Image (cartoon, helix red, strand yellow):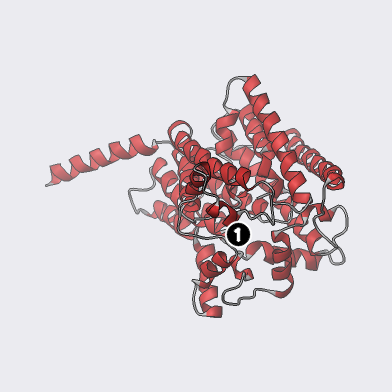
Amino acid sequence: MLKISKRWAARSDKLLKRLVGRSAPATAQRVSLRTAGMILASLVVWRGAITLFSWLLDRTGRASCGTGVPVPWKYSSCWDTETYQIIAARGYDYAPDSPSSIAFFPLFPLLMRWADDVVPGHGDVFASLIVTHIALAVAAFYVFLTVRADFSEAIAWRTLVFLLLFPSALFFSVAYPEALFLLGIAGCLYHARRGQWLLAGLFGIFASLTKLTGIVLFIPLLVEMSTQRALPGMERANSRAWLGALLAPMGAVGYFAWLIWQFGDYRVFFEAQENWVRGSNRPVFLYGLDRLRGDVTGMLAFYPRSITDFPTFWVLYDSLLLVAFFVAGILLWRQVRASYGALVISSCLLLTFSGNPQSMNRYVVVLFPVFILLARIRSSRVRYALALMFTIGLATEIYFFVNGLWAG
């Protein structure tokens, strides 16, 4: 029996090694003052360009975003921003069979309220932009350091550039929780990569309290634990690794527990999601296939003519984007790092079976390891062509957003 158990253990270890690889935790990566200054300067230039494009494209459009909000904050205030303002000012509301605010996770509006208390007189949109831009700046450093742990500084820079030029990167600059969510994901991956499991778990809580998708972070943490040979045992040194992985989804668990306490059932969240036209029972990519076959019923349920003149574009774009990121997750697992692939694959699967194709471009942009694949492309011409395409797409999304049209 002892020989058999040893044989099975050896085979299991061999299979695990083939699936996830083996490596020690990454050493600390330092950012020089010059590099730190360049990252911050790049963010300032990027944000300035978005503001300038927003002003120009707002003047050429047929409508305007952020009614009643002073310039330039109005260019960052549209669609979901109003709901976050309401939550920050008055708290949550719930009414059966109505699009209630409990469909929005609490960390972003909570930080909006705190920021508004610190900087009174400027309005909650200004406060939310303070939260957004601080989160983005810290997230940019985490993204850079995470990539730098395995690749050259040039690859780290390219990853950051592709991330910020991606069309839906617009949502890192507006009164939305995407920058905050990016910070949670990037911080979680970086500290897991360093073997700092409790910090990784705390960033996981941060992410899962910002968006429901954050609950999947325990999966890349488990994979990373295995990669660092921390998974098989339960020795004292490994108890922190297990605790970190278990902590990651606790933000969402805490929010659902609060919903039970307040409204008697955590399922009111999913009911509210459906009332916001954010849920169905079909895999997301099927809507794109339906449109290619000529069926527009499902497409118009999520992209009605009242919000966009281009429903076909959006359903095909969002469907294809989800498939592309899923494939990228597989490539990341095989070519870069298993835990990065696990993050992207598990996130895409959750989004696929949410049944909601809306805003897929916004949901996937936070999966920054995908941009490592683009940063590793050897041909500079291909990279420049992609950067140009992304920039045109970003300008288009800005036009849609600042004119109150559907942008994701």
Q: Residue at the location (61% across, 45% down)?
A: 312
> Can residue 367 be seen from the camera position used here?
no
Mark 1: few/some/many CA within 10 Å (<14, 14-19, 20+):
many
Q: Which residue is mark 1?
A: 210
Q: Residue at the location (54% across, 65% down)?
A: 274
- Lateral position of residue 7 relative to residue 363, left or right: left
Q: Residue at the location (60% across, 64% down)?
A: 276
Displayed quadrant of residue 275: bottom right
Residue 252 position (above or below residue 374): below
In the foreground, 216 or 195: 216
Residue 381 position (above or below residue 270): above
Residue 242 percent across, percent down from the top left = 42, 55
- Lateral position of residue 393 relative to residue 72, left or right: left
Q: Residue at the location (67% across, 61% down)?
A: 108
In the foreground, 93 or 1: 93
In the foreground, 159 or 388: 388
Residue 334 position (above or below residue 339): above
Displayed quadrant of residue 4: top left
Residue type, mark 1 in image? Thr
Count every numbered label the image shows and give the total: 1
Q: Secondary structure at mark 1?
A: loop
Residue 35 percent across, percent down from the top left = 72, 34
> Can residue 15 be seen from the camera position used here?
yes
Residue 155 position (above or below residue 283): above
